[in-house]
Amino acid sequence: MSNRHESLGIHGLQSHAPAHHLRRLTLLKRTHVFAAIGILLLGAGALGILGQRAAQSKELQGVTAEGAKIYVVLAKPQTAKSQNGIELPGTLQGYIESPIFARTSGYVTHWYKDLGQAVKKGDALLDIATPEIEQQLTEARATRRQIEQTVQLARTSFERWKALRQKDAVSQQELDERQTTLKSAEASLNASQANVQRLEDLLSYNHITAPFSGIVTKRLVDVGNLVDAGNGGAPKALYTLAQIDQLRIFVAAPQTYSQIIKVGIPAEVRLSELPGEVFKGKVVRTAGAIDTSTRTLQVEVNLANPKGQLLPGAYAQVTLKGLKVDGTVLTIPNNALLFRPEGTQLALVKDNKVHLQTIKISRDMGQRLEVASGLAPDDAFIINPPDSITEGDLVVVKATTGATTGAAPTAAPTATPAAAPVAPPAKAGGAS
């Protein structure tokens, strides 16, 4: 066979074996190199992805930790000496304030006084047309005349039968019947007269006059309006009058001062729109009982207003003088309060931790409140505490302010991170 291959010029397989083996070794080495390079590239890519994910996780943890921080503004209570008196808010009222209603139903034909005009007692305010009542009055008067004739006839008959009875011409029973008829007719006449008087009184209400001297604070009708009888509510009122030559103001005094407020003590009234002016008054009466919903004593102060300078409905500050109140008081802004089921609380901060302290308010002075108990002069509390704040929360103090209103400063310190979330301010009065 080998001779045959040689004669044909075909080399033997044994002669080609080393060359084939060398090629396979070279190809295998190349494959190993490429595989190693691929593995190295995959490993480097995996390491890069793992490193990127670790960096992102660390960054996310940092952002989460930063977002979990609560940035707050602190304030401390202000200390003030109690003066010889207390100042309370109130609203001026006319000594007499009354809505005017229609007593009869009808249409307005004319009005005489407009908004803001002064009126005297008995001045005409408006006229109302009531044709139905006029017709009823005409019928009632006609009925009264008929009954008067019946009474006259019954009286004449009774007198005649009475004379006959004296002559024993008629029986006593017949005389009694005539007397009963007369009394029945007289009773009908009295009822008819009462009905006529009632309709005349109703008709007199067509012309409405001022019940007292004052000013017109509201005019709620015009010509052609249909009005109903009675006081069916404010929309059906015709006018509102107020007597302003003397005013009264009601204030709610805290229970703490209820034992020292007496009738006759002087009072001073001040208005923000009249700076520097003081109006003198005095306490004329108290409720004599504590309002259980507010724990306050209602006090009425009267003051003269001869020039009409003070207007009913105006907000005023009333200072009750002559009250011997000694010692010091702590005041806080009204936007520091938290209203929780446990009561009125402050969010105190010590060592960057929150402590919810229950306090008692003795007096509301508008923007600031007097604290009766539960607060020390050195306590620091949060202004505009967030609704979600709880006991033991960690906070970051942005600033400490001593402003009277407790408002936070407009510019944050430079140390505060720009991306740090700031707790949203709560409404004045604290969280609910």
Image (cartoon, helix red, strand yellow):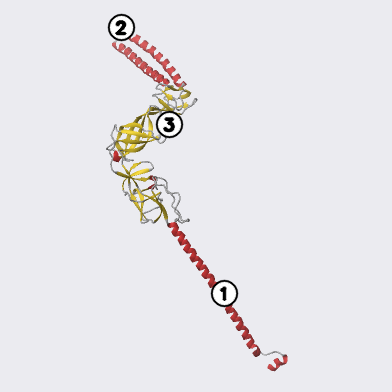
Percent x, y for residue 292? 31, 40
Secondary element under disc 3, as helix, strand or loop, is helix
Secondary element under disc 1, as helix, strand or loop, is helix
Quadrant in which the N terminus appears = bottom right
Task: Look at the image and tell me whether residue 432 can be seen.
Answer: no
Task: Name the residue beneath numbered marker 2.
Answer: 163
**Residue displayed at 30% across by 8% down:** 162
Say which of 63 and 127 sits in front.
63
Residue 38: image tag: 1
**Residue displayed at 40% across by 18% down:** 196
Position of 337 relative to 64 (above/below):
above
Are the two marked residues, 1 and 3, in contact with CB atoms closer than 8 angstroms?
A: no
Neighbour tally class for label 1: few under 14, some 14-19, many 20 plus, Cα within 10 Å: few
Task: Look at the image and tell me whether residue 11 can be seen.
Answer: yes
Say which of 397 and 277 sits in front.
277
Q: Amino acid at mark 2?
A: Ala
Q: Earlier in the sequence, mark 1 or mark 3?
A: 1
Say which of 218 and 285 sits in front.
285
Position of 266 relative to 25 (above/below):
above
Give the Cα separation between the discs numbered 3 and 2.
65 Å
Residue 234: image tag: 3
Q: Amino acid at mark 1?
A: Gly
**Residue displayed at 72% across by 92% down:** 7
Q: Earlier in the sequence, mark 2 or mark 1?
A: 1
Residue 149: image tag: none
